[in-house]
Image (tube, helix red, strand yellow):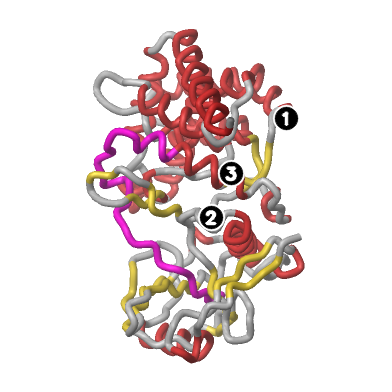
Amino acid sequence: MQSQINRAAGGESGALPPVLATTDPARAPDRTGGEGHSLLASSGPRISPGDAADFARQFYGVDGKVRMLSSERDANFHIQLPGGEQALLKVSNSMEDRAETGMQTAALMHIAAVDPGLPVQRIHAAKDGSAWVLIDGPSGDRHIVRLMSYIEGTMLSVAEPLPGLHFEIGRTLARLTRALRGFFHPSSGRFLQWDIKHAGRLRPMLEAVDEPVLKERVTRLLERFDAEIGPRLPHLRAQTVHNDFNPHNIVVDGPRAARVTGVIDFGDMVTTPNICDLAIACSYHLIGETGSLQPVEDLVAGYASVLSLEPEELDLLPDLIRLRHATTLAITSWRARKYPENAAYILRNAAASRRGLEILDSLDPSATNDALARAAARATSTASAGKN
C-alpha cells in the first residue's frame, strides 16, 4: 500500500503544514463511531474567529488573517497567510458521527496519494502529524478541527457553462471515481436515503408531496424501481463514490465557466453502483426550455473518456436520473413539512427536479438510450485511439 507525507515546509516556518497523502488504512483517522447523529436538530459550533486563530496557531503552527465563512452545520474559517497561501480551518459539528468524518478525511488523503492532480481539498497535518485534533467547545461539546487547503473559484450553481464544460464535468467525476476505486471505509456501507439504490424506501415520504399528479408519477416510478430497476442494481459495478456531484459542490474557473477547478463536500459518500453516481451528476444538467439532452450526452462522453460504461449501466441511466429527481422531491417535501419555517430553503431544488422528470418523460425512451450509448461509444473509441 502506498503511504507518504508531502514534506513541504510548514508549521513553524509560517507556511502551511505538510499534506497527508496515504492509501494505508492504518494511517487513516478514527474509524469508530462518534457521539451524535441528529445534525438536522443541532446548531453549528459556537466558535469565534479569535478561537479559530488560536486553534490554527496552537495545533498547526499557522498564523494569518482569519474570517468566518457561512456554513449550515460546521464552523468554517478562511485563513490568509502572510506569504499569500490560503487554508480552510473546519470545526465540525459535535453531533456529526466521528466515523463519517473519518471516512471523508481518509478519502481525501487517499485521493491525494492516488491522483494528486485531482482538484479536491488536501488535509494538512497537525503538529503531531495527525489528520485532526479534538477540542472542547465553549459549551463543553467535543469538536473535530481540521486544516484543509482552500479551493478558490466560482460555484457552478451561479456560473454560465461554456462549450466543453459538461464534458469536463463528466471527466472529473470519472477521475474521482477511479481514484476512489481502491478506497474502503466501514462508514461507506451506511444507509443513506439519498443513495438511489434505496429509492424503494422513499414511499412513506410521498404523503408529503402535495400535488396529486406529481405524487402519482413518483409512485409509479417507485413501483417500477421495486419490480424492474432495483433487482438489477446488485449486478452492477459498485464502490465508494462521491454521491452528490451537484453544481453547489463543483468549483469552476469563473462566472463564464470552461474548467472545473474544485470538487467539495464529501459528506454523502457511500458504497453504491457507479452508475448511480453518474446519474446524480447528470440529473442537474437537463436544462433549457427545449429540454435538450445535449449537456447530459456531453457529461456521459466525458465520463466514458476516462472510465468505460457497460451496456447495462447505460440502459439504466435514464431511469436512475429519474429516480434522483424522485428522491429529491420526496425527501424535500417530507423535510419541508417537518420544518415549515425553513421550507423555502429546503424546497429550492424541487422545481428543477419536477422539470427534470418532465423533460425525460417527454423524450422518446429508445432515442434517449441510443443517444447516450453513442456519446459513450464515441468517447471510449477516442480515448482508446489516443492510447495507441
Q: Amino acid at mark 3?
A: Thr
Q: Amino acid at mark 1?
A: Pro
Residue carrying label 2: 267
- Which type of secondary structure does the marked residue at label 3 adopt? helix
> Which residues lie in the magenta part?
144-169
- Which type of secondary structure does the marked residue at label 1 adopt? helix
Looking at the image, tell me whether mark 3 or mark 2 is earlier in sequence order: 3
Q: Is residue 59 above or below residue 365?
A: below
Do the CB atoms of the residues marked 2 and 1 lie less than 8 Å apart? no
- Image quarter of the N terminus: bottom right
Residue carrying label 1: 234
Residue 233 horizontal/vertical position (percent): 68, 28
Q: Amino acid at mark 2?
A: Gly
Residue 209 horizontal/vertical position (percent): 42, 31
At 37% across and 73% down in the image, what residue appears? 86
Q: Nearer the viewer, residue 89 or 12?
A: 12
Residue 65 horizontal/vertical position (percent): 32, 83
At 58% across and 21% down in the image, what residue appears? 316
- Image quarter of the C terminus: top right
Left or right for 116, reference 51: right
| Quarter of the view holding residue 67 | bottom left
**C-alpha separation, residue under disc 2 versus residue under disc 1:** 23 Å
